[in-house]
Image (tube, rainbow, N blue to C red):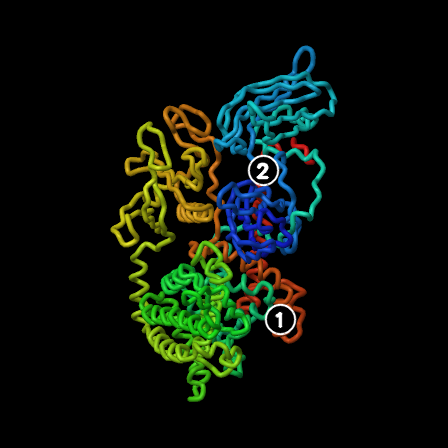
Amino acid sequence: MAKRSSLSIRIVEGKNLPAKDITGSSDPYCIVKVDNEPIIRTATVWKTLCPFWGEEYQVHLPPTFHAVAFYVMDEDALSRDDVIGKVCLTRDALASHPKGFCGWAHLTEIDPDEEVQGEIHLRLEVVPGPRGSRLRCSVLEARDLAPKDRNGASDPFVRVRYKGRTQETSIVKKSCYPRWNETFEFELEEGSAEVLCVEAWDWDLVSRNDFLGKVAVNIQSLCVAQQEEGWFRLQPDQSKSRRDEGNLGSLQLEVRLRDETVLPSCHYQPLVQLLCREVKLGVQGPGQLIPLIEETTSAECRQDVATNLLKLFLGQGLAKDFLDLLFQLELGRTSEANTLFRSNSLASKSMESFLKVAGMRYLHGVLGPIIDRVFEEKKYVELDPSKVEVKDVGCSGLHRPQTEAEVLEQSAQTLRTHLGALLSALCRSVRACPAVVRATFRQLFQRVRERFPSVQEENVPFIAVTSFLCLRFFSPAIMSPKLFHLRERHADARTSRTLLLLAKAVQNVGNMDTPASRAKEAWMEPLQPMVRQGVAQLKDFITKLVDIGEKEELDLQQTLSLQAPLVKEGTLFIHRTKGKGPLMSSSFKKLHFSLTTEALSFAKTPTSKKSTLIKLANIRAAEKVEEKSFGSSHVMQVIYTDDAGRPQTAYLQCKCVNELNQWLSALRKVSINNTGLLGSYHPGVFRGDKWSCCQQKDRTDGGCDKTRSRVTLQEWNDPLDHDLEAQLIYRHLLGVEPALREKHRELRGGTEAGAMPLGPGEASKDPLAQLLQVLQELQEAHRSSPTTPLPSEPHRLLELQT
């Protein structure tokens, strides 16, 4: 049994932000931190005080995390970025909203005394003596302290206060991972209600010392326990009054915390087998569980349920059969061809998820070059005469401004070029399309043609395919390339308009140039010749796409199964430590890296021969490196063992915080089941004769910070987690169990089925009764499983909660 926590985050927009630039505007972006660890950076929205991001993320975390904070920043090209304000949501606050926090939150000003992080290791004892008991406090070490100095570190010392008496440790220079091992004693009065305050400070020679955090210990509780030792989380100084809120603007967020207790696989087997049997039986099955699940699922959670079911069946090799069943159910209740797959049904949502999971790399191969070209050209494109702004275009001649007609013609030509390139790339991509996607479209094409066989409806099967491929997959990716990982930043206003018009053209082609699509926007008429040509190209492409036999499908799948699946690839800069020389950022070398389920490899270029750097089974940890270690940010380290079993470290530099966290997530997920994973590591480097992080001189020292192997970002190509998907489906079915029981009562002719438990003999004859029985058994398994409380620090009862 395992506890798993995840955060669903959607950063929607901001409003009424203060102007940070001399132009009277700002260039805002958001940084998301979990327990002061940056994990997400949104795109920058230029020159606005009311930015819209609309970015969504799923973050997997250990159940012990404390808070998630959203920092709104103003990007500056020549100086350090300005902090506008922040919103902080604690774990307890999120847990009190089962459906998630959704709404506007006021930004608050950043107070340095509240920006604390890290933990301190203390040993607290009540020591009896001839003249009364004494309080002994041993300050051992600290980790992950906030860097307060320009060199990326701090000069920490600890101040211990009790009953007006203060004692201090020595100062450890240039370290966020100091070790003191110093002990202090105080006279302890019987029944005293005083608290012991342990404060960490950053020493400064010229200016005032910076506050790093504190721990307040309840002495009465300590007297009962007599002794306590552990890592104490540093708390902010909240003695100051809260600053006025609202004058820094607001941030609209949607944040939902999910805690799941995942049982061993054997508990989910009856549920998985029952659902798989129903899918294999198809529409001829006796129970029709899938239609009942769709009927009892609200529109609000239909996308989540569709994704979970799809991943479950994908892991069982039944994704195509599951989608085929949904196609048949949708066709069975559709009378008009023009309404087919137009609603947000379970079939539509499941197919959307399927294309993202199975076809995202294919999408990147087809669309990537076209999207890159649009961003690089940055041409002014407009077809709507009411929106043409000649001043935005410049001059076509020496002194003559362009006319509106010239702007429209040039815009049409630009869009024709992009549309033609996209259609050509699509037509050449038949063999590149994954076999399971082709086979699923073949099933869809055949089912629709059987349902609408007349000559007048000959385009309906093609439109059914394009309704998913073009309207729900390619067009959204064209309009929002960042959300599909095609670009790292949002497009500016000019590029966004070009992408929108291109997406409209693709939709018209996908609709087979129907009169209804032409009538919507008559100003798209200049593209009609290209659209009509594109319809013919698209129909030819679909004909070839669905022309895949079962033998060819199996051959393609077997060929792919022999290759190690590609998890992630991209350009990184590498530096591996050798000798005792200084480590400088200039020694990093640019290479192309590929991560598969077997190894991390590199090559000079994407097409060059690859060399294995690290075997996947040898990875022991993947963690961030302190910025001061190399004088540059976004560096990670992969700790592994070589073929001789010797520990090695590879240092890799990424270009931004998002790329850093994506690589860390990928490495952690593919090595999660490795033996010998480390629980601690050094966030610095071994320079000269000591570690740069904690100043320890033993190179084999176990580490001064804990690893974060369970902090990962969810990606479309994540490895399938069968038990988690089964647990999520169980949780949903448990929520709609009353509706299922009511449905079972109706099917049994009005008997009170919901009033009594179902017997084994009764359940064996009825799939719905079997499902209800399985839910009962899983519910009982959760009740009887040993309850594992959220891991907490051993000092929790000693902290004073302010």
The Cα atoms of the two marked residues, 2 and 1, are separated by 43 Å
Q: Residues within 10 Å of mark 1 (few under 14, many from 20)?
A: some
Q: Is residue 188 left or right of residue 176?
A: right
Describe the element under mark 2 as helix, strand or loop.
loop
Q: Is residue 506 left or right of residue 161?
A: left
Q: Nearer the viewer, mark 2 or mark 1?
A: 2
The quadrant where residue 69 appears: top right
Of residue 106 and residue 373, the one placed in the foreground of this image is: 373
Of residue 142 and residue 687, the one placed in the foreground of this image is: 687
Type of amino acid at the residue the image marks with label 2: Ser
Residue 737's x, y, as percent? 62, 63
Q: Which mark is residue 792?
A: 2
- Mark 1 — residue? 743
**As drawn, which residue projects farthest toward the front?**
399
Residue 91 visible: no
Q: Is residue 794 left or right of residue 603?
A: right
Residue 60's x, y, as percent? 51, 49
Q: Which mark is residue 733?
A: none
* Residue at the image position 29 percent from the left and 61 percent from the top: 559
Q: Earlier in the sequence, mark 2 or mark 1?
A: 1
Describe the element under mark 1 as helix, strand or loop.
helix
